[in-house]
Amino acid sequence: MKSARAVVAANHSAAMARGQPNGSLAQDYQRPPSRTITGLRRWSIINRDLPPVSHVKAIHVYDFDNTLFQSPLPNPQLWNGPTIGFLQAYESFANGGWWHDPNLLAATGEGAEKEEPRGWEGWWNEQIVQLVKLSMQQKDALTVLLTGRGEGGFASLIRRIVDSRKLEFDLICLKPEVGPNSERFSTTMEFKQSFLEDLILTYNQADEIRVYEDRVKHVKHFREFFEQLNRRFQTAQNPSPRKAVNAEVIQVAEGAVFLSPVIETAEVQRMINSHNDAVRNRSANGTKSPYGPLCIKRTIFYTGYLISNADSSRLISQTLNPMLPSGLAESNDLKYMANSILITPRPAPRSILDKVGGLGKKLKWKVTGTAVFEHRVWAARLTPVPATEKYYTENPQPVVVLAVRKGARPIDAGKIQNWHPVPADKAFTFETVVGEKMVLRVEEQNPHEGEWESQFLNKNHKRRHQQDRDEDTSYHGQEGPSSGRPATYNPRHGGRHHHDDGPRRGGSYRGRGRGSGPRGRGHPNRGGQRGRGRGRDAGPPQGYRSLDDHTGYDGPYEEKPGPGNGGPVMNY
């Protein structure tokens, strides 16, 4: 007779043999032929009775992040390109970062305590919500929520979010630390495929399964997985555990919403504080992050007279639109600007800030002329109000670029020779405020770095990191940052106007740049007299200068070493 210890050891070994992650397809028919509903329930975080196998003819599986729920992403108008990837990489932070920290999901909207009573209104994909409700009503359908979020950190929060909309799932499955058969999953896809296999082999009388997923890569993997599974069912030498299943993987249109910038910055600072505490206490570094203490730094692209969203919209409608050829405004060929009047394409030194009255100084402007360069660049010439008001610009004259065709450069506004005067009674007047266009970045602390040096990307860090949420791929700097993904603020926060220098159609992200330009003449106005700039006060060469010409581009990210090297990754 075997001892109790020997029996336990034998059972554990058998469970491990049955539970090899993602290698299960090759071992399907070595496993016991029967799967049980009781065994299937072990995947779920809810204790709900499941329908009998004979009652289920359809299985509907819904992903959570950015399929059912519009989970916030790092805002590309707040962080530079490398930091977008760094924030989402598993190993960047000792606590796992963006997708592994439940506090960040809990901060969605105005925070869980305020959002839960109103059902996180405005943060749902309402079309998918309606599909879930239809699945709930279908008597022969099993309804499943499946997400790669970690069970340990997110089970309670995701259930609160789902319950707030009174959505009832038969199974809510999150990625466990250890699977029901003692499996360990290195990627979200391994976990999901292992679960889906168990699901359709348990409910082996179901004729169809539908999986709703937003990620292109996961859609492709799911389709290949079901094709492979069906081939094995059809070609099995032993009696097949079930007939082929009609599998449909529906790709849900991708979208992007963001937290309010103040909340997002505060949450990232909280993650940094937690990370810094953990790396000082090595035993608390759960992800074994290779990075030391981190901090938030600023990258200033340019200093300018910034135009409000409302006035930007008025400039577009009253000044630009009458100039546009018929049909161009409705096309995707136009990039709206009308967001600023350049002071200097870099952080302005104190001497220039003194000339313009310092950050926050308000100044009124009046449109005195309009022009278009080769049907590619539309601009307006300006004068301060009153005309004797002091101002400074490193362009030959104060100009606001209203719009450019895609592929055109705002610098071409400097080639405009003939301006069409605007009658005084039709002159558009608006107010600006002196400010800086900047983004934030996360880097390791450098005690030898001064305030000026900290404004530029640190090139000294050589460490690479995996940045995919599944921890199985690295970014190689070859894909564009958006792939046509629309980038918008959640409407609860009153999204930025689409003419502003914020998210634009196609979700283009601005790359990194120092904004330093060649030396030349400045053009301060002191009652009509010109002055010269020197050193960091230097003016430009002849021609119009703007952020687009000096501080980045709307194409793919550059490959840069160090913390934050990586493009954007999406959701679970």
Image (tube, rainbow, N blue to C red):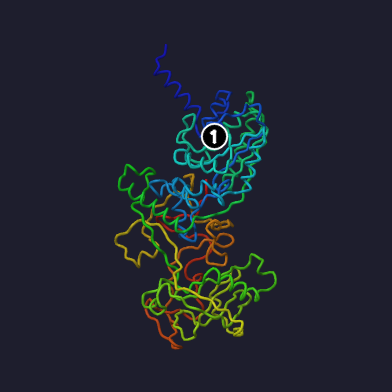
User: Residue 343: image x %, image y %?
Assistant: 45, 76
Viewport quadrant of the N terminus: top left
- Is 505 located above or below residue 105 in the figure? below
Q: Is residue 347 left or right of residue 149?
A: left
Count of all numbered marks drawn on residues in the image = 1
- Front residue of this view, candidates 560 and 188: 188
- Dot 1: within a 10 Å radius of its alpha carbon, few (fewer than 14), some, or many (20 or more) residues? many
User: Residue 557: image x %, image y %?
Assistant: 49, 59
Q: Is residue 30 left or right of residue 97?
A: right
Q: Is residue 24 left or right of residue 436?
A: right
Q: Residue at x 57, y 25 (%)?
A: 36
- Is 97 located above or below residue 20 in the figure? below
Q: Residue furthest front?
A: 117
Q: Is residue 388 left or right of residue 209?
A: left
- Is 82 located above or below residue 334 in the figure? above
- Front residue of this view, candidates 201 and 260: 260
Q: Residue at x 47, y 73 (%)?
A: 433
User: Residue 395: image x %, image y %?
Assistant: 48, 79
- Front residue of this view, candidates 113 and 194: 113
- Front residue of this view, candidates 269 and 27: 269
User: Residue 272: image x %, image y %?
Assistant: 38, 52
Q: Residue furthest right?
A: 326
Please tell me in which quadrant of the rendered image residue 532 appears. Answer: bottom left
- Is 436 located above or below residue 203 in the figure? below
Q: Secondary structure at mark 1?
A: helix
Q: Amino acid at mark 1?
A: Ser
Identify the residue under disc 1: 194
